[in-house]
Image (tube, helix red, strand yellow):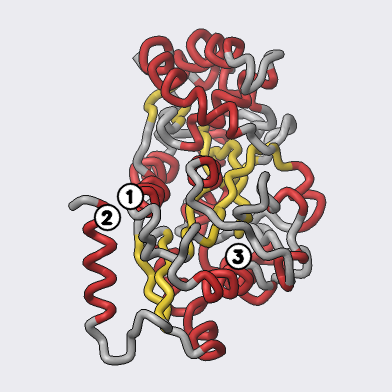
Amino acid sequence: MHPCLSVMSAVAIALAGADATAQTTLFVGGSGGSTETLMKEKVIPPFEARTGAKVVYVPGNSTDTLAKIQAQKGRQEISLAIIDDGPMYQAVGLGLCAPVENTGTIRELYDNARMVGDKSVGIAFIATGLAYNKDVFAKNGWKAPTSWNDLADPKYKGKVVIPPITNGYGLLTLVMQARINGGGEDRIDPGFDAMAKKIAPNVLAWEPSPGKMAQMMQTGEGALVVWGNGRVQAVADQGAPVEFVFPKEGAPVIMVAACVTEGAPQARLGQQFLQHLVSAEVQAMLAQGVAWGPVNKTTKISPEVARKVVYGPQQVASLVSPNYHVINAKRAEWTQRWNRAVEK
């Protein structure tokens, strides 16, 4: 189904309810799965109780939600979009996001959650780093990985799993290889050289599926992988002997970001819901429920939860912020080059 039609269907169904009216209904686009469940069960109800508004959550991945708000430009139905930071920079560049009101809980954010242009903000920190199967490492007498350079160690041949460049984790692996080898986003050649010549020979699979990645980590088939801290923790919570590592050169941050859409039918409610999302109370819910690192400096969480997420000034300061202005301009070119030289 065309993304525009799918959200229109959701709108039509919602409006069929006696209590849902255009004046009081806020449509929010965001991720499905466990995030959707948490939003509907924990995050949305207190906002509805406080404001008297009806919130309709429209699930979809970041690419889908970006496509929806792009297709509806000038006639938006979604008032608040929740997408990853890479696509969010694209949304801002396309004029799809309205300025964020700098008031209330927005002023409690870490500086690196304030996105360039102030038309969107991060609502969660996710660290991209290394994860390893502790049983496989112990059996082989290997020390825990500490560096992005470990991906190139020949002893891990056939044991490394990395998502492809079309996935944010694969893309950021390329960026970090460029950075640690004398380049960066604006000089990517060292990254491609490292990926093609040193790392690709070790790679068992360029795995895009979260489910398959989790399975490979559990079985030890993927003994050393690149993934997000929250996803690794979800696998560990199922009893698998896996552990996340913040590489010593830094962990690129993938922020879950949100913006009120330009021309939103419920702009005021959208700004209020954005402030609700970054409040200390909701940030604690997100950390507990989906292992999203708090962006609000005043958030308090238990030590048990803190071990599972990016938390506190020290860890937040260690995050590497990718230059998405360069990345998005080069993404198509890099993808073609990756397919020719790396994942061949």
Residue that appears at 22% across and 83% down: 16
Do the residues bearing badges 1 and 2 touch, measured as CB atoms within 8 Å?
Answer: yes
Give how far across and how far down residue 209 sits, in percent: 35, 41
Between the residue at mark 3 and the residue at mark 1, the CA separation in whole angstroms equals 32 Å
- Mark 3–mark 2 Cα distance, whole angstroms, equals 31 Å
Instruction: Please report whichever mark, 3 or 1, sits nearer to the chain's N-terminal start.
Output: 1
Decide which of 321, 25 is in the foreground and name it. 25
The alpha-carbon separation of the residues under discs 1 and 2 comes to 6 Å
Residue denoted by label 2: 4
Which of the marked residues, 1 or 2, is nearer the chain's N terminus? 2
Residue type indicated by callout 3: Ala
- Which residue is at a point 68% across and 40% down the rendered structure image? 246
Q: Determine crowd level at label 2: few under 14, some 14-19, many 20+ residues with C-alpha closer than 10 A.
A: some
SS under mark 3: helix
The mark lying in front, picked from 3 and 1, is: 1
Quadrant position of residue 218: top left
Q: Residue at x 40, y 64 (%)?
A: 78
Quarter of the view holding residue 311:
bottom right
Q: Position of residue 308 (x, y in %)?
A: 62, 57
**Residue placed most toward the observer, 84 or 235:** 84
* Secondary element at image label 1: helix
Question: What's the residue type where badge 2 is placed?
Answer: Cys
Q: Which mark is residue 117?
A: none
Find disc 3 in the rendering and name its residue: 287
325 and 288: which is toward the camera: 325
